[in-house]
Amino acid sequence: MKKYLNLILAVLLVIAVGVAVFALAHEEVVATVNGEKITKEELYRELVPNRGEYVLEQLISERVIMQAAKKEGIKVTEEEVTAELEKMIAELYGGSRDYFETVLSQYGLTEQTLKNNIRVNLLLKKIVRSKITVTEEEVQKHFADNQEKFNIPHEVHARHILVKTEEEAAEILQKLKGGEDFAALAKEYSTDPGSKEKGGDLGKFGKGQMVKEFEEAAFGAPVGLIDQAVKTSHGYHIIEVLEIQEAREVTFSEVEDKVREDLENEKIAAQMETEFAELRKAATVVKKL
């Protein structure tokens, strides 16, 4: 299914361009070169032979999934789509909506286009979920086979302010020593787009997730100490550790629901591509492009 989702996401830009082209009048000018016009019609003549078949296949795929879901009475609410989008923003863009919107803008996409594709993906997941079962024995075995995955890791919860120069870092350290608010300074000065809106908050992270110098400083500092800036390839970081979580093993009862959800998601992911292939094969598709 990852392959299918990648195709859907990869084609978003092409679809966006295609929709824009169709919306223009035939003689609409889309560009000029030294005063010479390039019209919508010329663009369309190039777009269809080169990308038209690819885009059409993606639109057919979406329609196949939507029709199958409707037939089975499966729906996805706007709240579910929004929740999935927010999860995506948190995981891929550090929770920064501004960063997310900047990326969309760079590719000429809209949030609604992405939400439409999220909706199709959720519909397919629900179709598959309705056909799988997870037994208690399977859940217990999944925990036994993957306990390390569910154990509590050694993590720290930290926030930081990233700046380009040592001089900037020194100035901010002085402001902090003078009692100024860390979060406010992060929002004003930090160059990290993924965390600055959250006052520099990076959430919890384990070893191996940050560059070496940052990791050593964060895992070696006590809670609350703001001592000196740490230099990395990204610049100078002023780091504050907010919480230290020590590693420990968990019992099955502590994480039973999480284990069940994890196993269910594994089964769904393993079946989605097959399910889509079967739906696509069963559909009567007539292409007229």
Image (cartoon, rainbow, N blue to C red):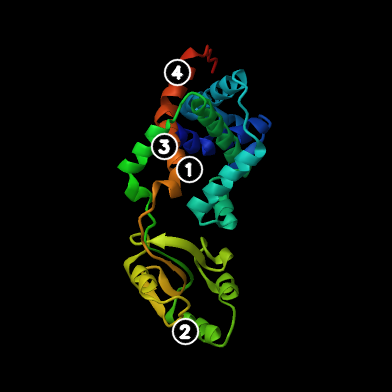
Q: Residue at x 48, y 63 (%)?
A: 202
Pair 2/1: label in front:
1
Name the secondary structure under disc 2: helix
- Indicate the quadrant where residue 96 lies: bottom right
- Label 3 – label 2 distance at C-alpha: 49 Å
Q: Give the amino acid at mark 3.
A: Leu
- Label 2 – label 1 distance at C-alpha: 47 Å
The answer to whether the residues at label 2 and label 1 have Cβ atoms under 8 Å apart is: no
* Vertical side of 46 occupied by 254: above or below: below
Looking at the picture, tell me which residue is in the foreground, 16 or 281: 281
Q: Residue at x 67, y 32 (%)?
A: 23
Name the secondary structure under disc 3: helix
Q: Give the numbered dot on residue 233.
A: none
- Indicate the quadrant where residue 37 lies: top right
Q: Give the amino acid at mark 1.
A: Asp
Name the secondary structure under disc 4: helix
Q: Find disc 2 in the rendering and name its residue.
A: 170
Q: Which residue is drawn at 52% across and 63% down?
A: 195
